[in-house]
């Protein structure tokens, strides 16, 4: 019988479909979400700064080859400055000479135009920045000032572009999710061993508080230098590592289920954070403390996002290329078989809880830096978002199956949904419902995949 | 159409089932008469279990029909199957451990009044069913306290509780002791007396001769023979199953036994292992025989460090070892091929290659790029890993392209070879095989035996735990028989011994 008859082909197609869905399903979902939100947030964008200047230069060069003159009118501010300087430069390259530049309010513009009209010079084009283009000064200009009768008014034309896809928005999405994504690296390891860590949200708070308190009380408060801040951050992170040692120790030595052990740690850490902070938010940190959370030193990428990407790259390599990575999967796949194959199961389990604690601590420091303070209220419910990111990313809660990079995709899915709903004006209660449904759908996909196996 | 004789109890006609890439069943038929035991034979992957899943309503065939008493029945779900009087007793039982025998028997068919279970009625009926199959368990005992044989009896009682007329038993004797097997056979004989048809799936050829009326052999999804059991000699049956003629079932070996390598002295652990001492010499295969529960597996787990010994020690080549974990044992050159490959030997969801490399991390860590202080750091050189496995795959005839597939997709024989490859790579000098051929089909068994012989010839020391007496007699140089945690006897010349000799030492 021929294998290519429709009856034989169907199961194979279905099998292929399931394979694609299982291996790249979440990436596909992320892509579709981006396309969806790009379409619904499509909007008129009036270019500003260099973009606006570029557009006007293109239109200037279409007006003619003969050297001509233009006047530039713009408001004040960094965008406007950029607009003026880029346009002046671009126009000069295109062969135009800039007859005058006016920066300021509508009054300044009128006065400079009148002053210019008083001279006997002619201009072909008055180039307006986006903000200047909205001023009423230029209505009926040719009748009031005959000197400008032949002049063309050039305003930046609005273009259609999705609000979602604007570079600032995309960076914002990444920056918003950085803390959750960083903590989710550790959570992925824990879940891969078949465990769970409910304490990460509280550890974020504990780390932000201990870090901030350390900077305030030991390292000189607002006058603390780089070294002082590093010490503060290290203390916060190490405290959380210690919490990981405790959770992991309880799980491995006494066989307490991870759910219970880390539930206890969650309360301990949260309470400790309140005690250390005396219930207050701690803001006595230097201004430079926001470098990690708000700075953007590498090609405009926020530092927190760079840190997140570096951590994912490192975790991916560790999980796929080192013995430790293999052992984590082995312990999650079948702990008894792993033990009988000589895997140091307890040490591996202890290590993942410690790593998870350290990364939660790092997340707390990033959050403290973003908000320029530490507070015991930080990270509430974050454990659930972190677990959701891991699960949506395709890691099986029963352990042994999943990928670190999948978690990054999962975190981005959550971030994109939240951001997209913000942009489209969905209220926050509805957002929760939608997020919950997405998590359920992800678990459903996990089921479909395990049925395939 | 008028037929002279009444239609058979069960007739399956033209059953076909296609899975992606493999035709599991191709136009397979099967008939079962009232009061008959039909043995369904075939290697792993021959289609036996798919056929039985079709009968149980768990798998929907692409083509074919099922007739009961000559009428066509739609069996599309397990509930349908139960309604038709078809009961399947799987190798792994479907009992809820925390529930009592009675509750398990009536699970899903509780006899209730206004939502309340009529416990008295259920108990009386459960007692009657248990009496019918001659089992002495109290209906209120939780199932987790039962022995394997008793659990099996509860499964049979469950089948009878729904008035099953067809009972399928999948490898029912795999974990039973010889007496329990005898008892099961008596129960089966009793069932057939009552007109129940039994389909018996097993790898054990001896049992087939003893119990089956007819034998149906499947190979590669097709029926290759249906014969009366007494007209099918053992050798021909094996050849029908394997599809080629076999050499000796137990290949012969050049014997050259040398000095003692593994020396075990005074091992104790609770009442499972009591003062066990023995030694295994270079090139020797020593079998630990005895009933299930005699403590054989417990002994080898102590040697391997999977459990902690309370007293005693193990020495290899004259050196006393301090073994506190499997890790220590592996480092010392001792390995254990567990009886339960699926749960203890392999990580089924992960690739064959990763399973192979698991205990051998140190071999594949790229030179100079790892430190082993914690025991789990180091870069893996994946090419070295693949090359090493490819060597074993060729020499052991492991299925081609197996490396990247999840270990769970391999047949039992290939799985066992992967486990063996992983231990050979870790330079094991003492190889402990616990039930080396359980769940492995006839053709692959011979290959495993061949590999064991080869290893013995290379001078390794081999310990074999086995419940299959022909295997013990055919493979071992020396047999140690255990009973209730002690070594109760030794058979120095297995060639001259019989199964009865072993049993007499095992039972006492």
Image: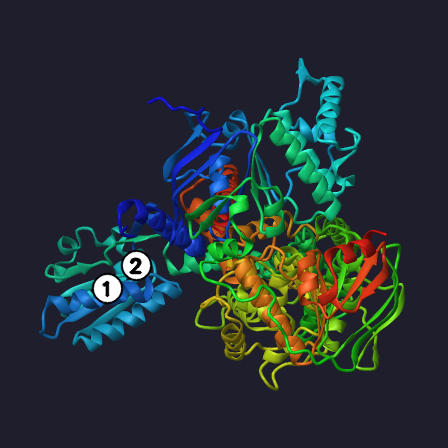
Q: Position of residue B240 (x, y in %)?
A: 47, 54
**B189 left or right of B215 in image:** right
**B269 left or right of A406 in image:** right
**A256 left or right of A15 in image:** right
* Alpha carbon distance from label 1 to label 2: 8 Å
Where B312 falls versus A450 (above or below)? below
Q: Which mark, residue A47?
A: 2
Counting residues from the start of the chain, the first of labels 1 and 2 encountered is: 2
Q: Position of residue A95 (x, y in %)?
A: 16, 76
Where A299 falls versus A250 (above or below)? below
Looking at the picture, tell me which residue is in the foreground, A107 or B332. Answer: B332
Where B23 falls versus B358 (above or below)? above
Q: Which mark, residue B319?
A: none
Which chain is disc 1 placed on? A
Q: Position of residue B134 (x, y in %)?
A: 74, 31
Looking at the picture, tell me which residue is in the foreground, A376 or A55. Answer: A376
Q: Residues within 10 Å of mark 2 (few under 14, many from 20)?
A: some
The reply to whether residue A144 is in sight is yes
**B178 left or right of A418 in image:** right
Q: Secondary structure at mark 2?
A: loop
Tell whether label 2 touches label 1 (CB within 8 Å): yes
Q: Position of residue B195 (x, y in %)?
A: 58, 27
**What residue appears at the point 36 percent right and 47 percent down from the top-left corner?**
A11
Pointer 1 residue: A55
Most extreme residue toward the bottom is: B368
**What residue appears at the point 13 percent right and 53 percent down from the top-left corner?**
A143
Total marks in image = 2
Q: Residues within 10 Å of mark 1 (few under 14, many from 20)?
A: some
């Amino acid at each position: 019988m021929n294998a290519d008859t429709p009856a034989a082909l169907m199961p194979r197609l279905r099998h292929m479909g399931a394979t694609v869905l299982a291996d790249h399903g979440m990436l596909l979902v992320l892509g579709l979400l981006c396309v969806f939100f790009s379409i619904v947030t499509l909007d008129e964008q009036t270019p500003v700064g260099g973009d606006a200047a570029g557009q006007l230069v293109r239109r200037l060069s279409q007006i003619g080859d003969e050297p001509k003159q233009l006047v530039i009118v713009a408001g004040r501010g960094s965008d406007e400055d950029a607009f003026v300087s880029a346009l002046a430069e671009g126009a000069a390259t295109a062969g135009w000479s800039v007859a005058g530049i006016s920066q300021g309010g509508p009054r300044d513009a009128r006065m400079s135009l009148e002053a210019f009209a008083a001279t006997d010079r002619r201009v072909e084009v008055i180039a307006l920045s986006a903000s200047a283009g909205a001023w009423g000064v230029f209505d009926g200009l040719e009748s009031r000032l005959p000197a400008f009768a032949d002049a063309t008014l050039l305003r930046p034309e609005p273009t259609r572009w999705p609000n979602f896809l604007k570079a600032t928005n995309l960076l914002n999405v990444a920056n918003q999710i950085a803390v959750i994504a960083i903590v989710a690296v550790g959570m992925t390891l824990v879940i891969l061993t078949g465990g769970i860590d409910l304490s990460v949200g509280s550890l974020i708070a504990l780390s932000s508080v201990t870090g901030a308190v350390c900077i305030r009380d030991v390292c000189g408060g607002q006058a603390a230098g780089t070294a002082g801040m590093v010490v503060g951050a290290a203390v916060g992170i190490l405290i959380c590592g210690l919490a990981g040692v405790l959770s992991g120790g309880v799980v491995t030595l006494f066989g307490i289920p991870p759910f219970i052990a880390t539930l206890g740690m969650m309360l301990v850490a949260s309470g400790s954070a309140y005690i250390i902070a005396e219930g207050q938010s701690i803001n006595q940190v230097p201004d430079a403390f926001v470098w990690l959370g708000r700075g953007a030193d590498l090609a405009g990428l926020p530092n927190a996002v760079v840190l997140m990407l570096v951590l994912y790259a490192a975790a991916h390599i560790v999980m796929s290329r080192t013995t430790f990575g293999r052992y984590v999967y082995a312990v999650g796949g079948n702990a008894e078989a792993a033990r009988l194959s000589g895997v140091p199961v307890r040490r591996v389990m202890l290590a993942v809880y410690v790593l998870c604690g350290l990364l939660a601590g790092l997340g707390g420091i990033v959050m403290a830096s973003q908000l320029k303070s530490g507070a015991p209220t930080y990270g509430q419910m974050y454990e659930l978002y972190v677990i959701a990111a891991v699960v949506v990313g395709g890691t099986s809660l029963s352990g042994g199956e999943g990928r670190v990079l999948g978690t990054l995709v999962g975190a981005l899915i959550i971030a994109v949904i939240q951001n997209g709903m913000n942009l489209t004006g969905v209220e926050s209660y509805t957002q929760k419902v939608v997020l919950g449904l997405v998590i359920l759908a992800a678990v459903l996909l996990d089921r479909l995949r395990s049925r395939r196996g | 159409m008028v037929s002279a004789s009444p239609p058979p109890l069960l007739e399956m006609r033209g059953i076909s089932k296609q899975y992606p890439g493999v035709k599991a069943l191709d136009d397979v038929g099967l008939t079962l008469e009232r009061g008959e035991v039909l043995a369904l034979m075939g290697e792993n992957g021959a289609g036996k279990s798919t056929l039985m899943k079709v009968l149980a309503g768990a798998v929907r065939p692409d083509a074919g029909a099922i007739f009961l008493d000559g009428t066509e029945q739609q069996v599309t779900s397990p509930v349908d199957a139960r309604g038709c009087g078809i009961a399947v007793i799987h190798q792994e039982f479907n009992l809820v451990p925390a529930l009592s025998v009675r509750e398990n028997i009536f699970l899903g068919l509780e006899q209730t009044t206004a939502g309340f279970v009529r416990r008295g009625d259920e108990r009386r009926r459960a007692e009657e069913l248990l009496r019918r199959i001659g089992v002495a368990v109290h209906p209120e005992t939780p199932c987790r306290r039962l022995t394997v044989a008793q659990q099996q009896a509860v499964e049979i009682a469950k089948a009878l509780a729904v008035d099953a007329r067809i009972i399928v038993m999948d490898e029912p004797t795999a974990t039973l002791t010889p007496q329990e097997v005898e008892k099961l056979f008596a129960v089966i004989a009793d069932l057939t007396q009552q007109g129940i048809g039994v389909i018996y799936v097993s790898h054990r050829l001896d049992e087939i001769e003893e119990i089956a009326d007819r034998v149906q052999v499947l190979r590669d999804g097709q029926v290759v023979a249906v014969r009366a059991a007494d007209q099918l000699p053992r050798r021909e049956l094996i050849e029908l199953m394997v599809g080629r003629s076999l050499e000796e079932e137990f290949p012969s070996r050049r014997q050259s036994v040398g000095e003692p390598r593994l020396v075990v002295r005074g091992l104790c652990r609770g009442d499972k292992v009591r003062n066990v001492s023995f030694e295994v010499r270079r090139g020797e295969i020593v079998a630990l025989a005895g009933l299930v529960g005699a403590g054989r597996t417990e002994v080898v787990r102590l040697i391997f460090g999977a459990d902690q010994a309370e007293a005693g020690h193990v020495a290899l080549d004259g050196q006393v070892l301090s073994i506190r974990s499997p890790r220590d044992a592996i480092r010392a050159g001792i390995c254990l091929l567990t009886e339960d490959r699926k749960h203890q030997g392999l990580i089924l969801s992960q690739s064959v290659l990763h399973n192979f490399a698991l205990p051998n991390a140190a071999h594949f860590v790229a030179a100079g790029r790892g430190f082993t202080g914690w025991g789990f750091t180091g870069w893996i050189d994946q090419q070295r890993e693949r090359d090493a496995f490819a060597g074993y795959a060729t020499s052991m005839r492991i299925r081609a392209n197996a490396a990247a597939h999840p270990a769970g997709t391999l047949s039992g024989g290939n799985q066992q070879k992967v486990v063996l490859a992983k231990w050979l790579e870790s330079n094991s000098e003492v190889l402990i095989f616990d039930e080396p051929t359980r769940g492995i089909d006839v053709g692959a068994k011979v290959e495993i035996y061949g590999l064991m012989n080869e290893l013995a010839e290379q001078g390794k020391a081999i310990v074999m735990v086995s419940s299959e007496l022909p295997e013990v007699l055919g493979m071992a140089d020396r047999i140690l028989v255990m009973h209730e945690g002690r070594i109760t006897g030794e058979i120095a010349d297995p060639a001259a011994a019989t199964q009865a000799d072993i049993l007499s030492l095992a039972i006492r």
